[in-house]
Structures are given as C-alpha cells and as structure tokens.
Amino acid sequence: MSSRLGLIMRGLAAALLVLVSARMAAAEERRLPVPAVSIRVGEVIRDDMITERAFAPNLLGVAMFIEGRQVLVGRMARRTLLPGQPIPTNAVEDPWTVARGAMVKVVVEDSGLSIVTYGSAMQSGAAGALIPVRNTDTGVIIRGIVQPDGTVKVVDGS
C-alpha cells in the first residue's frame, strides 16, 4: 500500500511540475504588435492593420522589435510587413513630408535676409530629414532640412 501511495505522490508531483513549468513559460511570453494583414512599402499604418501575438523570448533572439502599437500607428512601412510577424524597429519610419521629384519651396535665411526659390527634391524625406534639392533655375544641387510644412530650409554651407 505504501508503494502505491508513493507512486501516486510522484505522479502528483510530476503533474504539479508540468503545471508550474507551463505557468512560467506563459509568464515569460512577450506580447508584440504584429500586422493583421500584409502592409506594403510606403503604406501608412492604421490601427485596424495591427493585432497582438505572444512570442516566447527565445524565438525573438536579440533583435529589436517594436513593443507598442502606439509606436506603429501613423508611421510608414519601409519594407513589406507580413501578417503575424514581429516588426523590427528599423522597418517603419515617419511618413514623408516631401516625395522624391516633388517641387518644393526652398528657403535660405541669413542675418534677417530671406530668399525663396523652388527646387526638385532628389529624395523623399520626413520633417527634420536632410535631403538634396536641385535648384530649378540654376541646376545647382543644395542640401536642406525638410520642414513640417513641406518647405526645405537650406543649411549653412550648402
């Protein structure tokens, strides 16, 4: 009878160990935002395009993934984002304020003097980005910082 009781006790201990291991694994899971649909390059991410999924830490490795959906909404995909896959931090960017090839107002300011001309953006950029612009009158390429209103402000020395 005592060997039978010992066998029952060992069985209960094994079941308890399995339950505790499962709970610990669930506690270590990380919930990350993932695309609910395929998101194409250049597409602005909306809230309805994102869902959450649990990942085991050992599956994520050392890569940096976006951990909150508020970081994603309103940003633009730099590459195709596949449904159910974690989103690397470098896979999204702020939406472009200026598109490549667009005509932009170029502003040069120095000592209270302001000169305005127009140019063609040679690369796309969000507000705060340094981009090259070709002056439409002279053909000279200058560099400037994209402003939130879409104008490009020439930086010193360009």
Image (cartoon, helix red, strand yellow):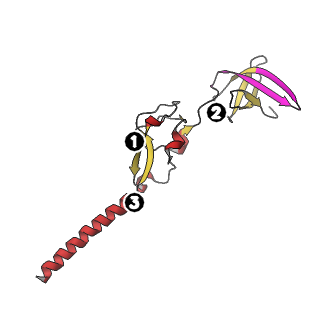
Which residue is denoted by mark 3 in the rendering? 27
Outermost residue toward the bottom? 2
Tell me if residue 1 is in the magenta stretch: no
Q: Quadrant of residue 4?
A: bottom left
Q: Earlier in the sequence, mark 1 or mark 2?
A: 1
The residue mark sitting in front, 3 or 1, is 3
Q: Quadrant of residue 9?
A: bottom left
Q: Quadrant of residue 20?
A: bottom left
Secondary structure of the residue carrying tag 1 is loop
Secondary structure of the residue carrying tag 2 is loop
Q: What span is colored magenta in the figure? A: 99-117
Secondary structure of the residue carrying tag 3 is helix
Separation of marks 3 and 1 at Cα, in angstroms: 20 Å
For residue 89, side relative to residue 4 (left or right) = right
The percent coordinates of residue 99 (x first, y second) are 62, 25
Q: Earlier in the sequence, mark 3 or mark 2?
A: 3
The percent coordinates of residue 108 (x first, y second) are 81, 28
Which residue is denoted by mark 1 in the rendering? 84
**Above or below, comparing residue 63 to residue 23 in the picture:** above
Separation of marks 3 and 2 at Cα, in angstroms: 39 Å
Q: Quadrant of the N terminus?
A: bottom left
Which residue is denoted by mark 2 in the rendering? 126
| Residue kind at label 2, given as amino acid type | Ala
Separation of marks 1 and 2 at Cα, in angstroms: 28 Å
What mark, if any, has residue 16 been given in the picture? none
